Amino acid sequence: MRYRAQRCAPGGPRICGFCGSTENIDLHHIDGFEEHVETGNVMWACRSCNVRVGVQMAYIGLGRPTRQMNPATQGAKSLAQWLTAVRSAKGEIGDMDVAAAVAMIRATPPKRRSEFAQQIWEIRRRRGTDRKS
């Protein structure tokens, strides 16, 4: 949705409609829904104002929180995928292109990364390799 909205950006100079800033300008959805890209629902806003307005809208229950994601990948789905990406990014194996490995690592949510780390430590404990030699 974010990319579709950029095509429906309002005309005119990129100036924040709230404070007049010309730095860090983003597209702001007036009703808080990214899928509503009509001309009357989008305006320019600096990142600071956009965040402040978003927080206030969330507080009163308007709009919908955005879901940040990399459209190219959804991140690692399994420990095997995760390890392949990490080892490829480190140059230990050549199973994945480094750029694709880095994209997968970045797209994997922090909670999922923690789950993978716990799985790795469980395996190391079972094997007795959880201590430095």
Image (cartoon, helix red, strand yellow):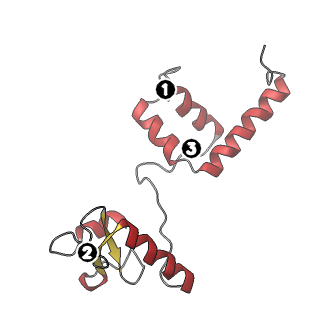
Does 115 sit left or right of 126 as displayed? left
Task: Tell me which amino acid carries mark 3.
Answer: Ala
The residue carrying mark 1 is 95
Residue found at x 40% / y 84%? 31
Amino acid type of the residue that numbered disc 1 sits on in the rendered structure: Asp
Badge 3, how many Cα within 10 Å: few under 14, some, many 20+?
many
Which mark is on residue 76?
A: 3
Query: Can you give x and y, in whole percent of width and height, for residue 88 in the image?
Result: 50, 27
Residue 104 pos. (x, y %)? 49, 42
Q: Is residue 115 above or below residue 21?
A: above
Task: Estimate the spatial distance between the alpha carbons at disc 3 and disc 2, rounded to whole Å.
Answer: 41 Å
- Camera-nearest label, 3 or 2: 2
- Residue at screen point 31% across, 79% down: 18
Q: Residues within 10 Å of mark 1 (few under 14, many from 20)?
A: few
User: Residue 115, how many percent across, how many down?
Assistant: 70, 45
**Quadrant of the snapshot with the C terminus:** top right
Numbered circles on residues, count: 3
Locate the N terminus and report the quarter of the image it occupies. bottom left
Q: Describe the element under mark 3 as helix, strand or loop.
A: loop
Q: Residue furthest top?
A: 133
Residue on which the image places disc 2 = 20
Marked residue nearer the N-terminal end (2 or 1) = 2
| Residue type of the residue flagged with mark 2 | Gly
- How far is disc 2 from disc 1 in space, using C-alphas? 49 Å
